[in-house]
Structure formats: structure tokens, C-alpha cells
């Protein structure tokens, strides 16, 4: 069985193997907290055993719902924010044709679009304009149904869908993924008779990609959710026991050893643009899990070789507070060979006959060598191919590593208290009922 691999050799010039091994006990203890549910935030550990617990019947129900939306729609809008959008977006982008956006909308193979991940008026206007002559459906994802960004998008798109096809037909094209019993969206879904899936109380948003939150939009896009979950199940088994062969534990210990050695920023690097949104998902996973108590590695990302022509200078010669985790993809889905040109005005005949991927791999290797020589330690994750099973492995690898790393760092990896601060200010500025005192205080502050 092929599986993803982790190599830390190019980190060892900045932190010794002994320093990493010195965290063996801390890593094993952290893993035990994740596995046994004995650490802070243990009421949000439902994701740990999830891949092995998902039944074929549950996955088939998700796929059947997706097939219904695919049959009836030219476009399906997934409404959600944070973990309710990034995981699905990451997997869909990684598995889809790069130019999917330019494909005409068609029944049976709908475009999967996203809303509720911002409050841009232009974005919502242009989305509604695009959908105005389309047969579309909605997947609305919200535990409460009152989170501002998705609630605005759902109010607008629900009204548009009902106006275009009627209330009764709209009910058949709206799927709600929400709380099992309570909340505004649960109440509405029950009243309207929407098909629903449950967001489990013990799975936080950023760990929810392997629940219906991520699996339904991924299935609507036409990808194999059974294989995705199988890959995660394989990694669940491979990382359940502490030891040198547990790559999630090794990753967590290595990045914490680097952090203690002064490496405060981790840059996730890819050499395939299809992984751009995977990095966005990873940034939320680690940023929201570890950025607490004035601690935490700052997660950043670059898309190479593109960003070698923008961020490359800083990474090579800037402040030495960074390390890189590079994702390399072994097999490409397609083959393109560079042709010979008789005039050779561009000077490229020395690589004529080579695959483009060979050139890309040499750019990757040359960059890793240059960055290591420049004092930037590198971790290397090898992904056999951009296929569902390996993405499932990668998702679970990072999730498990995140839980272990957060506990080594001595923070609660499963809460996000800082996320609420902007909301209180926004509600006060908008004079939301119940925020009268906050509204008065913030207006007084702004009028000074």
C-alpha cells in the first residue's frame, strides 16, 4: 500500500535529532491525550475515530444526496465559513481540472460554488447574477444558523431560489448540515422539510472535512468520498500508537523543537497549484488551533515556483525565524514533453525531450537545497499522487499532528476564543439587539 511519507533530514542542521527525541515523552503524552480524550478540549475529539466509524450506509446516503443534486442542478452553492468551507474547497480544487471554472454549467455535472465565506457585496451580487439563469441548489452549513456571513448568503440565495423555481421545488434543492436538535437552521430545516445531515457536537469546524460538511460538496463535485475516507482510515490506524514510525507525532515534535529553537513561522510549500486551497485549509487548522496564550507557530504558505519570483528572496535571505514544510507530488495525472525548436532562441533545447514535471522537480530540489544552505530548515512530505486516498491520508496526518502539537505547546488545540472578539465589535457597530451597552461604548470610543 502506498502512503504519504515524512522526511525531517533537512531540518537537522537547525535542530538536533536529540532535541527532537527529547520530546518523545511529551509527544507520546500528547498523543495519549488525543487518543484517550484526557486533555483540554476533549469534548471536540470526535474526529479522532471518525474515519473508522463512518459506515458504508452513511457514505452512501451522502453520495445519494449528492447524486440528486448533480441530477437536478447546473450549479450547487455550498454556504459556510472557516472549516465549513475550506476543507471541501481544498479537496475539490486538488482533484479537479485546473480550468474547471471555465467549463459551461451543465446538468449532471454541476459546478460547486461557495458563498458565506465573506461579506463582499460585489461577490454576492455577481454570484446571484451568475445564478439568475441557472438551475441551482444549496448546501447550507451552519451549526447555529445565525453566523453572520453564511446567514446573509443563505437568506439571499434561498429567496432567489424560491423566486426562480417556487417554494415547493426549492425545498427539494436545499440541503442543511446543522445541529441535531437546536438552532435557527435546525428549526427552519424541520419546518421546511429540507434533507439534513448533522454536525456532531464533538467535531469542531476545522476538523470537519471528513464529515458531511466536507464530504457532501466533495461528492457533488464528482469525487470519490469512499476512497477519501479510506485514506484517512489508513492514517488513523498508522498514527494511533506512539513511536518513531508515527509520522504525525514526528511532525509535531519536530515543529515544536524548531519553535523552541527560534523558528516562529512555518511555511507550507507546494509545487502544484492545485494544492493552493489545501494550504488555506492547513493555515486555518494550525492557526486557529495553536495561536493562543501569546504562543504558537505562525502558519504561512507559498505556491512555487510562482512565489519564488515574489517571496523567494525573503525566504532565501530574510530573517531566519522560518522553516518550511514542502509537499511534493510524485506522480502527475498528465504528461507534457518539452519540444525541440530548431532556432532555439529561448535557449531551452537543453531540456527538450524532458517532461515538464522533471523540470518542476529539479526546481523543487534546487530550491530546497538553496533554502537549507540559506538557513531555512525543511521538512518534506511526499504525496504519491493527487488522488482521494492520499488526500485522505494527508488530511488525517495533519489533523492528528495538530492535536499532538497543540498539547506539546501546552494550549487547548480545540477552542478558538479569539475568534469571538471581532464579532462582538461588529455586532456593536451594527447595533444588534442585545448589544446596546457595547454599541454605546464603541461609538463613544470612535467619537473621541
Image: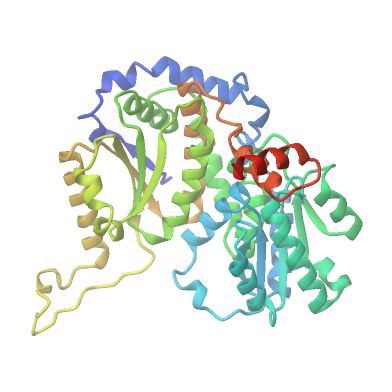
- The residue lying toward the viewer, choosing from 115 and 271, is 115
302 lies left or right of 204: left
For the N terminus, the quadrant is top left
Q: Place residue 419 in its image quadrant.
A: top right
Q: Place residue 296 in its image quadrant.
A: top left
- Seen at 63% across and 80% down, the residue is 106
Q: Residue furthest front?
A: 448
Examine the rendered structure and indicate whether residue 119 appears above or below residue 251. Answer: below
Residue 180 appears at what percent x and percent y? 81, 43
Residue 320 appears at what percent x and percent y? 24, 35
Examine the rendered structure and indicate whether residue 337 appears above or below residue 38. Answer: below
Q: Place residue 80 in its image quadrant.
A: bottom right
Asked whether the viewer can see residue 329, the reply is no
- The residue lying toward the viewer, choosing from 71 and 60, is 71
Residue 77 appears at what percent x and percent y? 66, 65
- The residue lying toward the viewer, choosing from 373 and 212, is 373
For the C terminus, the quadrant is top right
- Seen at 15% across and 73% down, the residue is 352
Amino acid at each position: 500500500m502506498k502512503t504519504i511519507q515524512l522526511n525531517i533530514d533537512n531540518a537537522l542542521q537547525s535542530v538536533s535529532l536529540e532535541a527532537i527525541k527529547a520530546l518523545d515523552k511529551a509527544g507520546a503524552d500528547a498523543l495519549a491525550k488525543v487518543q484517550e480524550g484526557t486533555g483540554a478540549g476533549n469534548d471536540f475529539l470526535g474526529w479522532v475515530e471518525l474515519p473508522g466509524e463512518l459506515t458504508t450506509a452513511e457514505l452512501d446516503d451522502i453520495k445519494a444526496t449528492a447524486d440528486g443534486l448533480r441530477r437536478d442542478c447546473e450549479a450547487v452553492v455550498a454556504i459556510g465559513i472557516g472549516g465549513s468551507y475550506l476543507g471541501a474547497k481544498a479537496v475539490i480544487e486538488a482533484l479537479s481540472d485546473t480550468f474547471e471554472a471555465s467549463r459551461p454549467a451543465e446538468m449532471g455535472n454541476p459546478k460547486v460554488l461557495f458563498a458565506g465565506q465573506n461579506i463582499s457585496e460585489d461577490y454576492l451580487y455577481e454570484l446571484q447574477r451568475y445564478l439568475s439563469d441557472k438551475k441551482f441548489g444549496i448546501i447550507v452549513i451552519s451549526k447555529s444558523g445565525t453566523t453572520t456571513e453564511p446567514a446573509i448568503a443563505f437568506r439571499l440565495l434561498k429567496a432567489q431560489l424560491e423566486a426562480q423555481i417556487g417554494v415547493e421545488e426549492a425545498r427539494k434543492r436545499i440541503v442543511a448540515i446543522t445541529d441535531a436538535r437546536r438552532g435557527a437552521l435546525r428549526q427552519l430545516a424541520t419546518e421546511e422539510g429540507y434533507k439534513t445531515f448533522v454536525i456532531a457536537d464533538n467535531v469542531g469546524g476545522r476538523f470537519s472535512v471528513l464529515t458531511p460538511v466536507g464530504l457532501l460538496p466533495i461528492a457533488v463535485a464528482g469525487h470519490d468520498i469512499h476512497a477519501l475516507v479510506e485514506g484517512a482510515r489508513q492514517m488513523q490506524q498508522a498514527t494511533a500508537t506512539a513511536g518513531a514510525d508515527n509520522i504525525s507525532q514526528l511532525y509535531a515534535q519536530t515543529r515544536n523543537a524548531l519553535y523552541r529553537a527560534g523558528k516562529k513561522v512555518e511555511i507550507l510549500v507546494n509545487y502544484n497549484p492545485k494544492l493552493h486551497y489545501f494550504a488555506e485549509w492547513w493555515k486555518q487548522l494550525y492557526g486557529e488551533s495553536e495561536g493562543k496564550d501569546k504562543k504558537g507557530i505562525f502558519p504561512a504558505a507559498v505556491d512555487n515556483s510562482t512565489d519564488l519570483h515574489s517571496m523567494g528572496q525573503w525566504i532565501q535571505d530574510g530573517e531566519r525565524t522560518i522553516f518550511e514544510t514542502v509537499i511534493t507530488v510524485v506522480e502527475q495525472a498528465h504528461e507534457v514533453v518539452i519540444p525541440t525548436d530548431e532556432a532555439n532562441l529561448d535557449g531551452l533545447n537543453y531540456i527538450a525531450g524532458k517532461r515538464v514535471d522533471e523540470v518542476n522537480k529539479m526546481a523543487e530540489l534546487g530550491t530546497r537545497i538553496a533554502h537549507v544552505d540559506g538557513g531555512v530548515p525543511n521538512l518534506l512530505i511526499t504525496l504519491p499522487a493527487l488522488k482521494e486516498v492520499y488526500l485522505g491520508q494527508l488530511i488525517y496526518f495533519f489533523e492528528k499532528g495538530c492535536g499532538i502539537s497543540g498539547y506539546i505547546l501546552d494550549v487547548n488545540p480545540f477552542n478558538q476564543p479569539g475568534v469571538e472578539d471581532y464579532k462582538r465589535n461588529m455586532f456593536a457597530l451594527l447595533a444588534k439587539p442585545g448589544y446596546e451597552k457595547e454599541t454605546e461604548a464603541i461609538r463613544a470610543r470612535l467619537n473621541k
